[in-house]
């Protein structure tokens, strides 16, 4: 019996692997450094990401910067700050001043003091999720991954 494994590639291609058994295919992939379990995990993670909310519906671009229009009730202050900076990254490809972020989130009704916002910004910087360039804060690659893996999924579950 012949077994075929078809893998869809990102750019509309397809990889076809044939073998006498599934175990033979798995062994052949392992020999060239491909772990089928990791591929399957990646596929599962990719399918979850495809179900995430449309990020264009998460922000409204104003003269003060991007304002998160998603319901922030289930987000922590840290997550709300990251989401706001993510909006600046997506919509403007730039950062935001701390005062801008704080004004936007206070206007959105987040119940926190100004000093608490600054403390959360310092924590996010320490954790490598944001960085300061000049007088602006920007989300890092690590921060973007955190938003996509945690925050957007949290928002998605809220709207199910």
Image: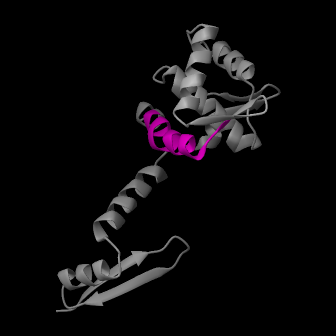
> Left or right: 15 with respect to 107?
left
Q: Does the magenta stretch include residue 144?
A: yes
- Rendered view: 107 above or below 64: above
| Residue in view at x 33 percent, y 59 percent | 41
Q: Which residue lies furthest to the right in this view?
A: 63
Q: Main secondary structure of the magenta part?
A: helix
Looking at the rendering, the stretch of residues picked out in magenta corresponds to 138-154
- Residue 39 in the image, given as x and y percentages of width and height: 36, 67
Vertical side of 121 occupied by 7: above or below = below
Nearer to me, 130 or 15: 130
Q: Which residue is drawn at 46% across and 49% down?
A: 51
Residue 111, quarter of the rendered image: top right
Residue 159: x and y in percent read 45, 33
**Residue appearing at x 41%, y 51% in the figure:** 48
Tell me the quarter of the image containing the C terminus.
Answer: top left
Q: Can residue 35 be seen in this view?
A: yes
Residue 60 at x, y percent in the picture: 71, 32
Residue 4 sits above or below residue 123 on the image: below
Closer to the camera in the image, 76 or 123: 123
In the figure, residue 98 lies in which quadrant?
A: top right
Q: Number of marks in the image?
A: 0
The quarter of the image holding the N terminus is bottom left
Q: Residue furthest front?
A: 126
Q: Name the residue at 28% across, 84% down.
A: 28
Relative placement, left or right, of 114 versus 4 is: right
Image coordinates of residue 38 in percent, x first then y, are 33, 64
Residue 71 visible in the shown view: no
Q: Does the magenta stretch include residue 148?
A: yes
- Residue 82 left/right relative to 73: right
């Amino acid at each position: 019996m012949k077994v075929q494994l078809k893998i869809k590639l990102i750019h509309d291609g397809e990889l076809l692997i044939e073998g006498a058994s599934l175990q033979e295919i798995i062994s052949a992939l392992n020999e060239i450094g491909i772990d089928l379990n990791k591929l399957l995990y990646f596929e599962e993670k990719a399918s979850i990401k495809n179900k995430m909310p449309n990020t264009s519906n998460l922000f409204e671009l104003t003269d003060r910067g991007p304002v998160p229009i998603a319901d922030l009730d289930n987000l922590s202050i840290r997550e709300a700050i990251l989401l706001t900076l993510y909006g600046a990254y997506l919509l403007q490809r730039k950062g935001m001043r701390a005062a801008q972020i704080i004004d936007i989130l206070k206007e959105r009704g987040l119940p926190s003091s100004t000093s608490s916002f600054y403390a959360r910004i310092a924590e996010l910087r320490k954790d490598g999720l944001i960085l300061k360039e000049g007088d602006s804060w920007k989300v890092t690659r690590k921060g973007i991954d955190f938003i996509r893996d945690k925050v957007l999924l949290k928002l998605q579950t809220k709207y199910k």
